[in-house]
Amino acid sequence: MHLTSYGAVREVTGSMHLLTTSRDRILLDSGMFQGRRKVSEEKNRQLPIDPAMLTNVVLSHAHIDHCGRIPLLVKNGFAGRIFSTRATADACDYLLRDSAHIQESDALYLNYKAVRKFLNELARGNRKKLSKRKARDIKKMLKTSKNRINDDAVNSIINKYNLKSIEPLYTMEEAEQSLTNFESYPYREPIKIGKDATCTFYEAGHILGSAVSLIKIVEQGKTFRILYTGDLGRFDKPILRDPCTDFPEEDREIDLVIMESTYGNRDHEPVEDLRGKLERIFFETLDRRGSIVIPSFAFGRTQELIYVLHEIYNDKGVPRIPVYIDSPLASNLTRVYGEHPEVYDQETHETFLQKGENPFLFDKITFTQSVQESMDLNTDPGPNVVISASGMCEAGRILHHLRYKIHNPNHTILIVGYMAENTLGRRIQEFGKAYKEQGRQGPAPLLKFMNKEYPLYAHVEELNGFSAHGDRNEMVRFLQDSKFNIKKIALVHGEEEQQYAFKSMLEGKGFRVVIPRAGESIEI
């Protein structure tokens, strides 16, 4: 029996780990790589295993870097079941459809650009330059309106001239087909996932429905236990129950822990400091008559922000300026949060539910839906709070809000979560910090996105306490409070600097730790 990791190996995206026994092949997550477009595109299209050979999939939670390639598995022959918690399955219903829409839209846009370039060159012929009128005519022919591509016209030209076409990673139809493979279960209910394998989900505290997966496999009369943490959350945060540390005594002998290490060399701010720091940022920004722009993941982080803002507004801790959730996906996922009160912690029940209040709805919040509403919000003089996707500023409506706000020193860009390497979010975070350390003197650093450079004059603030990942001490607390007897820990889902620091810390506490490379197998 062995484990082979193919994604989130010495990096934080693309989670994919294959558990191979004498009778089964169980895949733990099937996540999408995120980062530089070209590199991520190549990684996402090349499945390292034949999906048809898989028995089943165990899904830890619904973030795209853990579930985003599930439709690709089904598209390429996977016929097994995808086991998850009920809340995770409900979230995937929105997330995978949204991902397919993005794949189709990106492919259409790239094909449009290729066809437009081809037609321009064809029309130019031997002339040095194409007339502006002809270029406008070609552009008009390929669009049904200013902002909408005519996909029939684009595909017609591709077929007529036998041009190379960009295909989406998967289509909406393929995403919807993959959703029929899901089977969802509550926490603490054993599930048969293979011929001699079972899995039980326990709370991970990361996002709604996230799970620590305890897998038991019988081989030659002996029971082996593998614990996959997925992404571990923080202790004492609002909304969700803490990561579980109360495991059955008979299941505490663990042969292998597959453990995340996102913040293996970092200590977060205390959770209780979040509110005070958020209030300070509010007052400082309002003194400048500015607005607060928050890049946020649609699932998890957005709902935590809504919850805390609701608390602050109820207590009149800050001026009650309008709050906009500018993400249709975030709006839908907030609805999913509202439909699963069975996973809320006691504090959420006492603060809101017992008073008849919805934690995620109050009078100053607006969920924008249409493109026009979003465009109107870009030019709203404020002050206001805009929470928008994507969380790492790589795509989506957040780019338009940054385009209108990033060059103005009155505004604040608030970083509330992890920004992976090679993302615009990481560059904003690092450049903003450097500019602040030099006293915000001299020319602001330049950031290029949407084919233009913008000076970063807006203030950049960070609230690390909002992180959905536990820090190094919280991850150690999870291991120790669970009273496990662990033979080996494999660190995944972390950049190398974080992993080696965490490995050293764990070894100092007596654990045996390995950091696998992509494709490397670990014997169990």
Image: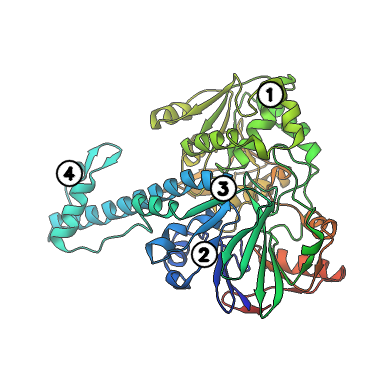
Which label number is shown at residue 56? 2
Q: Are marks 4 and 1 in contact (CB under 8 Å)?
A: no
Q: First in sequence, mark 3 or 1: give its number.
A: 3
- Classify mark 4: helix, strand or loop: helix
Relative placement, left or right, of 233 versus 367 is: right
Q: Which residue is mark 3?
A: 88
Separation of marks 2 and 4 at Cα, in angstroms:
47 Å
Q: First in sequence, mark 3 or 2: give its number.
A: 2
Q: Amino acid at mark 4?
A: Met
Q: Amino acid at mark 3?
A: Thr
Q: Which residue is mark 4?
A: 141
- Classify mark 1: helix, strand or loop: helix
Q: Is residue 284 above or below residue 494?
A: above
Spot occupied by residue 103 in the image (x, y as percentages of width and height): 38, 52
What residue sits 71% from the left and 73% below the top?
223
Q: Are marks 3 and 1 in contact (CB under 8 Å)?
A: no
Separation of marks 4 and 1 at Cα, in angstroms:
49 Å
Q: Nearer the viewer, residue 483 or 295?
A: 483
Separation of marks 3 and 2 at Cα, in angstroms:
16 Å
Relative placement, left or right, of 111 versus 79 is: left
Which label number is shown at residue 287? 1
Tag in front: 3 or 1? 3
Relative placement, left or right, of 305 versus 116 is: right
